[in-house]
Amino acid sequence: MISAVTLRTATLSRGLRREGGQTPERITAAVEGLDRITVDLQAVTADLRGLMGALAGDEIESGGLTGALSKLLVPLAESGVQVDISVGELGCDARVRSLIHRVVQELVRNVAKHAAARRVELTITQDRDEVRLALTDDGQGFDPAALGERQRRGHMGLLLVEQRVQDAGGTLQVTSTVGRGTKVVMRLPLAGPGVSGPLAR
């Protein structure tokens, strides 16, 4: 499907660049084509989310949530970063555990790539019917206003994760200051789309 979308976008681009290409009829056809492309990309995104969830689920079931998250942090520790992880007792189902894993996976990737941190702390707790995840680093930080520009340049990982958290009824808040590190907090109500279930450890 991605290959088909690539071909269609190339065709639309060539059509609009041709001499006389930007006629009202061709513009209308291009808009309709872009609408179809949007639908196809949404389907691809849903498929990829399902696949990532299944892969994460296998890893979590084999080693528990704490073990799976620790594996994500190993590359940071091996590079010399001090890593602290604390996972409390959680009453949540496999869907929520998979979402937690996916969020941490993206946040750790960003730390490794951009933060130049010396210390990273990950804490996950449950307070009544809400799961709270916090990942803090003491790295170089960034200007939150620059996030939009990074996303326009194609750095979509954090945005996609945030959308997935919102789809589950939660929130993802990023706080950062240049030179003073970054903190990301996810809050996920278990009464929402991710309902509580077996204990996760």
Image: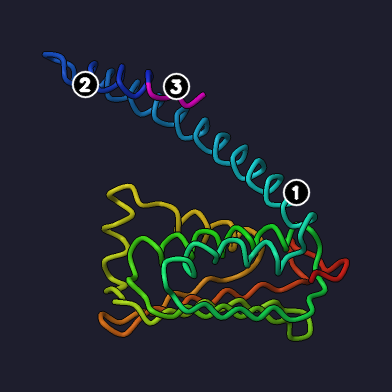
Q: CA distance from mark 1 to mark 2?
A: 46 Å
Label 2 sits on residue = 16
Q: For the C terminus, give its image quadrant.
A: bottom right
3 or 1: tag closer to the N-terminus: 3
3 or 2: tag closer to the N-terminus: 3
Q: Secondary structure at mark 2?
A: helix
Q: Nearer the viewer, residue 97 or 130?
A: 97
Amino acid at pointer 3: Ser
Quarter of the image where one finds residue 68? bottom right
Q: CA distance from mark 3 to mark 1?
A: 29 Å
- Specify whether 176 is left or right of 158: left
Q: Which mark is residue 151?
A: none
Residue that appears at 56% across and 81% down: 84
Quarter of the image where one finds residue 148? bottom left
Amino acid at pointer 1: Asp
Numbered range of the magenta stretch: 1-6
Label 1 sits on residue = 58
